[in-house]
Amino acid sequence: MTGRSRSVANPGANAGANAGGAAVFSGVVFSAAVFSAVVFYAAFAAIHVIARFLEHPLDAPTKLLLMPALAVGVVWASAGIRPRRLGVMALLLAAILFSWLGDGAATFFPMFEDELPMMLLCFGLAHVGYVLLMWRGRGIPRRKFPVWALIYAVAYAGLMVVLIPRAGGLAVPVAIYGLLLAGTAAMASRCGPVIAWGGFWFLVSDAILAFRIFVPEAMPAWTSGAVMLTYTLGQGLIAFGIVAATRRGALAGS
């Protein structure tokens, strides 16, 4: 699980092909399966985000379809990877599963009066999965932490200054979850631009959500849609970025 991916084509290379049917252009693997899977997930995400902004009744049911759609997309996009990266895909799907449970915490855990603790737990476990993937996932490139990633430490500190005094009995879970969230974003910064942007948008989404929960008077109504726009973007970029990196690593033999 510790291999690094390496470039599959020189920066100036025009094109090539691999046994799985993916074309290689300037070191980037383009696959019809990956493209179709992204479009599939993006369609569900777009429907939900539009419904959320418009406060349409489709908002609630489509929210619970987002992560299943992403899971289907991941399986679809990774089907042609040889050799198979079963460990990476299993951990990625587990992270998506816990994200789904977090999305539907009120539905899946009706025995709890407040859904927030279970939401924090489920998404916290999802972030543990993402951090492990970005730390040890085979075929996923890992570079040194860029200097700009220090912004996540600043963001964490700033969020805690605002949220902890308002979190009451959830202060410790909020602090731990915030650390995992910032950790995911920081680890993502090492794994190439697609995954890095995914980590960034995930953090932005949860930061907006945290303010909506704990500082609701400061958040206009449209920020509800912004939460889901940035969330679906972040999840998609992380998941498909990991699939694409794994595909490149398989081609390169890492």
Image (spheres, rainbow, N blue to C red):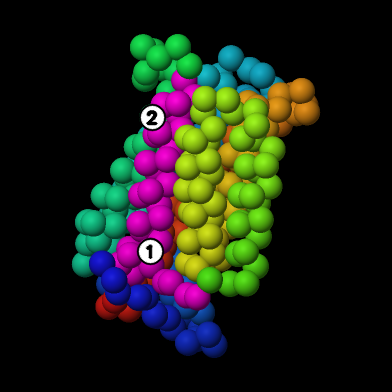
Residue 232 in sight: no
Q: Which residue is mark 1?
A: 135
Q: Where's residue 245, x and y in %?
A: 40, 66
Q: Residue at x 66, y 19 (%)?
A: 55
The magenta segment is: 115-144
| Residue type, mark 2 in image | Leu
Residue for point 39% across, 43% down: 126
From the viewer's perspective, tell me whether residue 60 is left or right of residue 2: right
Q: Disc 2 marks which residue? A: 101
Is residue 149 shown above or below 160?
below
Measured along the vertical axis of the image, is residue 124 above or below residue 65? below
3D distance between C-alphas at marks 1 and 2: 24 Å
In which quadrant of the rendered image does the N terminus lie? bottom left
Q: Dividing the image into 4 quarters, which one contains the C terminus?
A: bottom left
- What is the quadrant of residue 5 in the picture? bottom left
Question: What's the residue type where badge 1 is placed?
Answer: Trp
